[in-house]
Amino acid sequence: MQLLLNSVLSIVILCTLSCAQSKKIVDEQHCEVCIKTINTFADTLSDEDKASAEKIEKTFKTYCSKVKVDSKEHRLCYYIGALATSATYAIGDLSKPLSWGIPADKICRERLAKTNPQICDLKYEKQIDVNAVDLNKLKVKDLKKILTDWGEAADFIEKSEFIKRINEVKDKYIKSTTDKNKKDL
């Protein structure tokens, strides 16, 4: 009886340890701005530049100076320290691992996120396909975003008013899928 109890207890302990050591499922949106930006930047580098951390730092500062102001990428550059107005300087946490050939997702999720967790809080806004979604099921916030993205007035109170306005002006901003199908033929 004692032997059976010990074997069951050891099996439970082994299962607990193996479950605790299993890897977490990686969320694709976690650090998405950082990963995309660093991959885009790395694609612009020559093989010679990729080997030098100093050249990577200099080139990344130049890259960030050309990024659109008030974009997610600009905010990332600010957090890393590649802008003149940045409060921190963590470009070394980017340039050295990149020169060693470490992938962007590891640089973002493991290196940069430790120095500044806000880096991985940056996320792209989800794009809403007006033709594919039922407008009645969207939140007023999303309906308002659709109209403001199009540059239309969005000063309504009722959800039905937002939906009515989107349906009135959507032909100006969205090409129907039937037009695309005709062009493909």
Image (cartoon, rainbow, N blue to C red):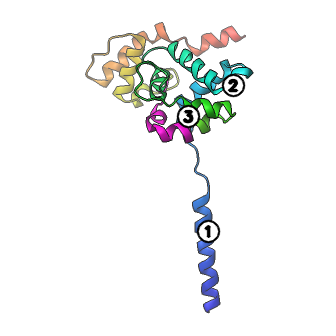
Callout 2 secondary element: helix
Reading the image, the residue beneath label 1 is: 15
Callout 1 secondary element: helix
Kindly identify the residue that appears in the image at 69 percent across and 21 percent down.
Answer: 49
Kindly identify the residue that appears in the image at 55 percent across and 31 percent down.
Answer: 92
Tell me the amino acid under the disc marked 1.
Cys
Tell me the amino acid under the disc marked 3.
Asp
Q: Mark 3 packing: few (<14 Cα in 10 Å), some, or many (20+)?
A: some
Magenta stretch holds residue 123: yes
**Which is more N-terminal, label 2 or label 1?**
1
Tell me the amino acid under the disc marked 2.
Lys
Question: Is label 3 or label 1 in front?
Answer: 3
**Labels 2 and 3 touching (C-beta < 8 A):** no
Main SS of residues in magenta: helix
Where is residue 94, by image quadrant? Answer: top right
Reading the image, the residue beneath label 3 is: 93
Q: Mark 1 packing: few (<14 Cα in 10 Å), some, or many (20+)?
A: few
Kindly identify the residue that appears in the image at 57 percent across and 61 percent down.
Answer: 20
Reading the image, the residue beneath label 2 is: 50
Query: Closer to the camera, 103 or 162?
Result: 103
The residues colored magenta run 109-127
Disc 1 from disc 2: Cα separation: 43 Å
Q: Mark 2 packing: few (<14 Cα in 10 Å), some, or many (20+)?
A: many
**Which is more N-terminal, label 1 or label 3?**
1
Q: Which quadrant does the C terminus fall into?
A: top right
